[in-house]
Amino acid sequence: MNITIRPALPEDFLYVLAHADPRTHRVTARLDPATALQALSLSSIAEVGLIDGEPVSVWALQRLSLLSGQGLLWMLNTPKAVEHPFTFLRRSRMMLERFQAECPVIIGYVQADFKQSIKWLRWLGFSIGPTYTWQGVEAHYCERRA
């Protein structure tokens, strides 16, 4: 198994979007390719994780403003990405350190039914807020400060 991380290309993101974990369908079904690629283009850092050359995960950081020091973390995975949890966990710590160097406050949202994702975010030091509903999807606000 060969794992590679490199800057994400638009075609990587579209591949992961097309093969995303089916549980994300409530959110990803609303994204047309142009809107999805705009999110990628607005990101100051965007990386892709590949397993044996196949894109399996895309994560990115969008600066919310230069003055606030806040960045919005977003990530999209295929089911294949979570088949290798220990590799994923180790690499996510390195990724978060780079993101945190750019934005001292990182925020994000996680679907409430993604229990493994919530555990992962807590392990990375994020605080998880109460559940709320956004466009019919139960989610939590999450935040990590440097």
Image (spheres, helix red, strand yellow):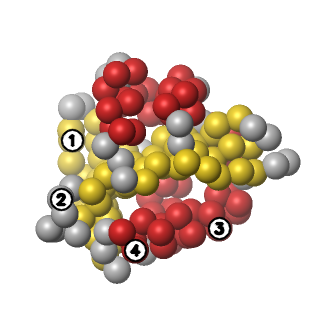
Q: Identify which residue is drawn at 64% across, 58% down.
A: 88
Element under label 4? helix
CB of mark 1 within 8 Å of CB of mark 2? no
- Which is more N-terminal, label 3 or label 2? 2
Q: Which of the two marks, 2 or 3, is nearer to us in this view? A: 2
Q: Which mark is residue 101?
A: 4
Q: Identify which residue is drawn at 49% across, 31% down.
A: 10
Where is mark 3, residue-wise? 90
Pointer 3 local density, CA inside 10 Å: few below 14, some 14–19, many at least 20: few
Mark 2 and mark 3: Cα distance apart in space: 29 Å
CB of mark 3 within 8 Å of CB of mark 1? no
Quadrant (top left, top right, bottom left, bottom right) of the C terminus? bottom left
Where is mark 1, residue-wise? 133
Above-or-below relation of 14 to 74: above
Q: Which mark is residue 65?
A: 2
- Which is more N-terminal, label 4 or label 1? 4
Pointer 1 local density, CA inside 10 Å: few below 14, some 14–19, many at least 20: few
Picture quadrant of residue 77: top right
- Which is more N-terminal, label 4 or label 3? 3
